[in-house]
Structure formats: structure tokens, C-alpha cells
Amino acid sequence: MQRLREHGIFLIIFVLSTLLRFLPLFDYQFTFDELSGLDRTQFNDLSTLLEKGVKVDAHPALIQLFIFFLVKQFGYVTWVVKLPFLIFGQLALIYAYLIGVRNFSKQTGLVASVLFSFSLIFVFYAPIARMYSAGIFFSLALLYYFFELVFHKRSDKRIYVWFSLFALLSALNHHINGLFAFTIAASAMVLISKEQRKPFLLACLFAVLAYLPHMPITLYQLSIPGIGVEAGGWLTRPEWTVFPAFVQVLLGTGWCFVVFLIVLS
């Protein structure tokens, strides 16, 4: 009961966030991005999937493999395909709150919870069966265990195991996600104590060795021209005005962001 009282506001936010995402569970429709991924699951073996369903997508294999096994087991049922990604988003919300409470203050954790629960960006991408909500979950979990190692000096084995696992999952989820994991690991190497260095190196070594079978796919994908206009793609280079526009959407459309900034102050 004491924990319920202590974290009651977060529980209310979590319940509201869950209702917001799960009430439309049976009304969601697939986006073109999801349909592209689903179209690349119609193979009979893993080698063909990796060759024709993963390499051509320029994304790591994790999510495509996950969806492949999911639809083979349950079929192309919309809510079934989307459900795991909604769960990833809610797990990310828990880690966002824990990072705030453990390392800053309860207010920080609650502000992070509100942002991850009700910001248009997180609400929109939560049910999309691609690497978005999974990437947020893996990144926040990795960041949480980074803080536990570096600032709380926790050295029990399970912290190293979780750090290694989420670093690996991040790298297999998205290349930018993998770059984030590398940055976190490099930062931890500089900041951890000497006593922690050996087990931390072993944790990183495990993640690297587990990732090595994916390297041929990664190297092939990095050799493919990008989607930027300069490479013949469709994505134009962003202007400087994109960042304040992104912040405004992140904190609330219209003038809602002003309210959010007032609350923060």
C-alpha cells in the first residue's frame, strides 16, 4: 500500500496511457510501412527471408524476424500483429519513469511519464508494428541500466546481463538504435569504476559476439545508397526550422507546449 501511495500519480498516468492505446485495439489499421514489412514475410524459410525480406529493407533483422514468426503462428490479424508493439511502448513508459525517479526526482519521472504517455508522437507510433516503440523500449531500458552501473555503482551480475541484452537488441532493432547503444557503452567505459571494468567488458563482448552473425547483412545494407535526395532517394535535407516544429509537436500542438513549459518551470 505504501508503494501504491508513493507512486499513485504514475499509476493513474499509466492506466490512462494504457486505455488510450488499447481501447482502439480492434479498430487499428495497418500503415503502408507495416504492409511493406508484412509483404516481406511471405517466404517459407529463414534464408530466403533474410535475403529477400531483410537485406533489401536496410533495417536490421530483429523486427522482420519477429513479425515473420508472429504471422506464421497467428496469421495476418491486425490486433495480434500490433499488440506486442503496444506492450513495448508501455514497458518503455515504466523505464522512463524509473530513470527519472532513480536519478533525478519524482517530478522528473512524472513529467517524463506524461510526455511518453500523451505526446502525439508517442501515441501515433505506439501501435505501429515496426521498430519505433521497440526502439524506445530498448533504448530506455539500456539507459536505465547504464545509470545503475555508472551512478549507482551496482555490480550484481543481472545488471550487466540486462545491459548486454538491451545493447544487443538495440543494435538488431535499428542501425541508429545500435549507434545509440554504442555511444552509451563507450560512455560507460569511461565513467565506470575500475572494479566494474572487467565484468562490463565481458558484457559488451557478449553483445558484440552475439551480433557478429548479423554483420554480413549490416555491411550489405550500409553499401546501399540512402534515401536522401543526394543518393537518388525521396528524403530532402531538413531545414533548421524542423527542430522547433518537432519540439512543438512533442510538447503539444497549438499552444499546449506553453502550458507544458509552465508546468516544467
Image: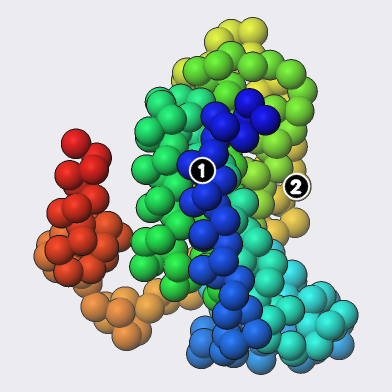
Residue at 58% from the left image edge and 22% from the top image edge: 149
State the quadrant of the N terminus: top right
Residue 176 at what x, y percent from top left?
A: 47, 56
Residue 261 seen = yes
| Label 1 residue SS | helix
Residue drawn at the location 27% of the way across and 57% of the way down: 251
Is 87 above or below relative to 182? below
Please determine whether, in this image, residue 231 is positioned above or below residue 15.
Answer: below
**46 sits left or right of 116 in the view:** right
Which one is nearer the viewer's eye here, 228 or 100?
Answer: 100
Q: Is residue 8 left or right of residue 105?
A: right
The three-letter amino acid code for the residue at tag 1 is Phe
Residue occupying image coordinates x 51% and y 43%: 10
Q: Which residue is mark 1?
A: 10
Residue 85: image quadrant is: bottom right
Q: Residue at x 74, y 18 (%)?
A: 156
The residue beneath circle 2 is 210
Inspect the image, locate mark 2, and give the three-letter code of the amino acid beneath it.
Answer: Ala
Name the spot of residue 162 as percent of width and height, x first.
Answer: 70, 36
Q: How many marks?
A: 2
Foreground of the two, 206 or 30? 30
Element assignment for label 2? helix
